[in-house]
Image (spheres, grey):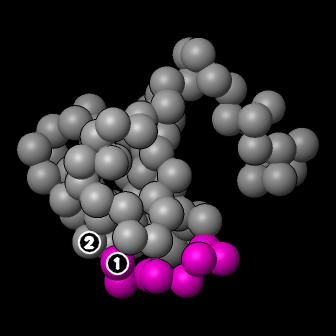
Amino acid sequence: MEICHFPENKVISCSGPFNQPGVAEVAAWVRSLNPDPNLVLWLTDTFFTGHVVLTPGITADEIRASWVDHAEHDPTVEYPEYFGN
């Protein structure tokens, strides 16, 4: 499992399923290093099949419970401000 933080794109990406052991914990830790509430930071998988919006103070359990499946929710429609739509 590889977990990458891309500060410029404001995203944390994991190379496999987001629910692999340790991913939620690392994502929560990275968010804790960036506590600015104005920073929008997402956890996605490599194929961008889903995401979790990482809010300040989010826990690993909250991350695991908050996965948004892009087959059911199109982020480009729901968050046009992030995708230039």
Instruction: Check the image and name the residue furthest to the left.
Output: 21
| Relative side of 60 to 78, left or right | left
Quarter location, residue 39: bottom right
Give the residue type at disc 1: Ser
Q: Is residue 37 magenta?
A: yes
Residue at image point 24% right, 54% down: 60
Give the residue type at disc 2: Trp
| Relative side of 70 to 3, left or right | right
Residue at image point 22% right, 63% down: 26
Q: Which residue is mark 2?
A: 29
C-alpha span from label 1 to label 2: 5 Å
Q: Which residue is mark 1?
A: 32
What secondary structure do most residues of the magenta stretch adopt? loop
Quarter location, residue 37: bottom right
Label 2 sits on a secondary structure element that is helix
The spot of residue 84 in percent (x, y) is: 86, 50
Magenta stretch bounds: 32-39
Q: Nearer the viewer, residue 62 or 22?
A: 62
Q: Is residue 58 above or below residue 44?
A: below
Q: Quadrant of the C terminus?
A: top right
Q: Is residue 31 magenta?
A: no
Instruction: Check the image and name the residue furthest to the right.
Output: 85
The reply to whether the C-beta atoms of the residues labelled 1 and 2 are less than 8 Å apart is yes
**Label 1 crowd bin: few (<14), some (14–19), many (20+), radius 10 Å:** some
Residue at image point 24% right, 48% down: 61
**Residue 44 appears in view:** yes
| Relative side of 16 to 67, left or right | left
**Label 2 crowd bin: few (<14), some (14–19), many (20+), radius 10 Å:** some
